[in-house]
Image (cartoon, rainbow, N blue to C red):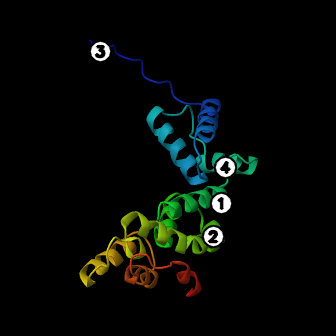
Amino acid sequence: MRVAREPLKPLDDPALERLALRYVERFATTRVRLATYLDGKIRLRGFDGAPPDTAAIAKRFAEAGYIDDRAFGSARARAMARRGLGAQRVAGALHHAGIGSEDRAALAPVIADLALEAALAFARRRRIGPYAHEQADRAAREKHVAAMIRAGHEIGLARRIAAMAPGDDTSQLGDDR
C-alpha cells in the first residue's frame, strides 16, 4: 500500500538560495543551466510571493566565483575532444549548455587546437584510416568520412584520415594545416 506524501511547501528566497548552492556544489554548470534548474524548481513547488529573477541569482553566483562559464566550456571541449568529437559538435554542445557567444569565441582557439587530436581519437576508436586492419575500398572510405563529419570533423581532415593506409604515420597531418 502506498503512503500519500504531503505536497512540498512552496519555496521562499532562503530555500531557493540553498537549492542553488547545493546544485553548484554538486555539478559543474553554467549560468543558464542554473537559472533553468531554479525555474523548474519554482514551477514544481511554487513560490511564496512573486518569483525572483533566477538569471540574477545565477549572475550573482558567477560573480562570487561559484560558476565560470568559460572554464566549464573549456573542460567540456577537452572532454569531447578526448571522446573524438569534432569542432562542430563541440560548438553545438557549448551553445546548448548556454555558453555565451563571447565565451564561445574565446574558446574557439582551444577547440581548433584540439581538432586534429579529436579526429585521430575518433579514427582510432572506429578503426579508420591508419588505425584500420586493412585498406578500405572507396565505399567504406566514404562511410568513414560520413561518420567523421557526423562527429563534427571538417570534411578535408576526414577525407585525409580516411584515405590513409593502415599503419601510416599520422604526424604528417599536423603539417598540412
Q: Which residue is rendered at x = 27% and y = 84% of the image?
A: 138
Crowdedness of circle 3 by 10 Å Cα count: few (<14), some, many (20+)?
Answer: few
81 up-or-down from 129: above or below:
above
Amino acid identity at mark 3: Arg
For the view shown, which residue lies furthest in the left direction?
Answer: 139
Numbered disc 4: secondary structure: loop
> Which residue does the image show at 57% across and 39% down from the upper left?
50
Provide the secondary structure element on which disc 2 rests: helix
Residue 144, image x, y percentages: 33, 75
Q: Quadrant of the C terminus?
A: bottom right
Image depth: mark 3 or mark 2 in front: 2
Q: Is residue 97 left or right of residue 22?
A: left
Q: Residue at the location (66% across, 49% down)?
A: 67
Check if mark 2's residue and mark 4's residue have beta carbons within 8 Å. no
Which disc, if any, is residue 125?
Answer: none
The residues tagged by marks 3 and 2 sit, at their Cα atoms, a distance apart of 53 Å
Q: Which mark identifies residue 110?
A: 2
Give x and y (percent) for residue 121. Answer: 47, 66
Sequence-wise first label, 3 or 1:
3
Q: Earlier in the sequence, mark 3 or mark 2?
A: 3
The count of marks equals 4
Circle 4 packing at 10 Å, graded few (<14), some (14-19), many (20+), is: many
Query: Between disc 2 and disc 4, whose residue precedes?
Result: 4
Going 43% across and 84% down the picture, which residue do you hit?
Answer: 160
> Label 4 is placed on what type of residue?
Ile
**Dot 1: element:** helix
Give the amino acid type for the residue marked by disc 1 in the picture.
Arg
Sooner in the amino-acid sequence: mark 1 or mark 2: 1
Q: Which residue is mark 1?
A: 70
Q: Nearer the viewer, residue 59 or 130?
A: 130
43 above or below 7? below
Disc 1 + disc 2, Cβ < 8 Å: no
